Each structure stands twice: as structure tokens, then as C-alpha cells.
Image: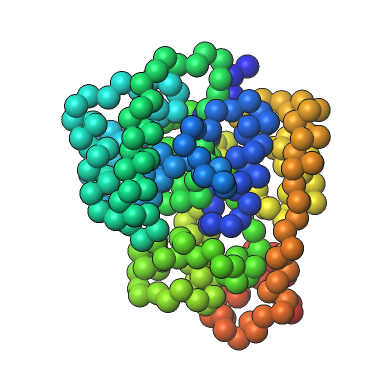
Amino acid sequence: MLGLPVAIGGVGGSGTRVGAALLGLLGYYIGDDLNDALDNLWFTLLFKRRSVVSDTESDFRDLAAMFFARMSGALVLSAKQRERIWQLCDDERQQHPREWLVGRAESFIAGDHEPIEGVPWGWKEPNTHVVIERLFAIKSDLRYIHFVRHPLDMALSENQNQLQTWGSLLLKRDVRVDARHSLAYWCEAHRRAMTFMSRWPERTLLVDFDALCQAPAAAAEAVAALLGLSAPDAVLSGIVELVQPPGSRGRYRAADLAQFDPADLQYVAALGYDIRT
């Protein structure tokens, strides 16, 4: 049985790379233009930009259609669509200079080819959670897996790319790149994701990376079930070998929790996370 198309997202550093590797074990195509973290850089080009929130519905749908066609191997671009892709390279972005964007556009446009029969597809790009609701409205068979990790460990991470890109938009205020604002961003991103997922329980899955480290085979079976597949023994053993709990787990225990907003700490505790130091 061919697996359903799927997207993986989450706040950066939450273990989504393991999710992408699991898709590979399940026989999924996840793109040709990937970084070391297995992010789909075509998605980054098309959708990781602050201006995406003001895209017209028509423009967003056209970009989504091009992306889905590229992933399924059925992309045929019109002259207007090629022009739109190149327009995405006009303005440098916070983490991506123009040369980098041009490389992604060249890779994306080079993808005119026949579909690969019998190969399911999906992608991993943490920023997916920002636009997943709009993508769900376009593609009715799309599934979504949202990765989370202990929010205090996340707030103390050096990976604050999403806070820089989306923080002021999601929090609706100016933000600083510090642990306090990082936790506030995590809380708001989590609320948004949970509200969205509550409307689509049959099409979404929440994966806690810390729990995955404890029981990787169970997480693999849950992912496979969401995609309409079973997880063979080779996949289960492969994910067990792949998962290596990071040394940064529990780093919040050495931190001063007074730096965080008490309301955010209360929300984290209400979710069941231990916040004792």
C-alpha cells in the first residue's frame, strides 16, 4: 500500500530530523535538496519567509500546487510560475542570502520529470507548522506530524532561528533573542499547533521527542499507522539504532527559572512537563 503524503514540523531543535529519517526507513521520498538536518529546502524557499502570512490565497495555492507537484514528480512549470519562483530570490532573508535562495530555485526548477510510481512522499521542515493549516485546506490527504521536546530545554537552545523569523508575528510584539522570549514563542506555537490538530485528529500526530528516545519503536508504529502503513521489523530496528538521546536533555535543571514569564511556566507545567530544577 502506498503511504499517504505527510509533513513534519515543530519548533526548531525538537527532533524532527529523526522523523525525516523514519520516513526514509518507511520508503518515503523526502526531496532532493536537503541540508544535513534533512530539511526540505524547496519548502524553505517557498514558505519560510515572513511575507508568506500576507500571500493572497491564489498565490499561496499556486506555490503549494507547485511544491506538491515537485514532490510527487509531476512538476511542469509555466513561464509565469518560473517567474514567481525567481521572485522568491529577490530579497535576502535573515538566515538565507540571495545566492543561497538562487541555488534552491535552480534545484526546484530542474525538477521536470515523470512521477516515480509506487513511492510515497513527504517532507520535513520545522517551519511547516506556521502554514500547515493553509496546506491542509488545499490537500485533503495530507498528514501532519508535530514534534515537541521539553520546552525549557528548547528555550535554552542555541537554535533560535524560528524566534528570529516568526517571533514578533506570533507573539504580536517586539521580541529579543533570549530564553524568556524563546519560551514565550514555544508556548504560542504550541497553542496554535494544538488548536489546529484538535480539528484534525485523524490526520495529525503529536510526537514527543523525549518519549521517542525512551520508546522509539512505539513512535515508529504510531507514525506508520497515521500514514496507513505498518512498520516492519526492519523499520523498528532501524529507528532504535538511529535514536540517540542528546546530551542537552534536562539542561533546564541548571538554569534560573526566574528568567521566564511565570504564565509561560504555568502553561508548561499544565502540559505535564517537569519544571523542577
- The picture quadrant where one finds residue 238 is top right
- x, y (%) of residue 178? 50, 76
52 or 106: which is nearer to us?
Answer: 106
Is residue 152 among the parts visible in the rendering?
yes
Is residue 53 among the parts visible in the rendering?
no
- x, y (%) of residue 29? 55, 28
* Quadrant, the C terminus: bottom right
At horizontal 33% and vertical 38% (from top left) the residue drawn is 105
* Quadrant, the N terminus: top right
Q: Is residue 161 left or right of residue 250?
A: left
At horizontal 57% and vertical 36% (from top left) the residue drawn is 202
Relative to 118, does residue 101 appear above or below in the rendering?
below
Relative to 80, does residue 73 appear above or below in the rendering?
above
7 or 105: which is nearer to us?
Answer: 105
- x, y (%) of residue 158? 56, 68
Q: Residue furthest front?
A: 99
- The picture quadrant where one finds residue 183 is bottom right
242 or 134: which is nearer to us?
Answer: 242
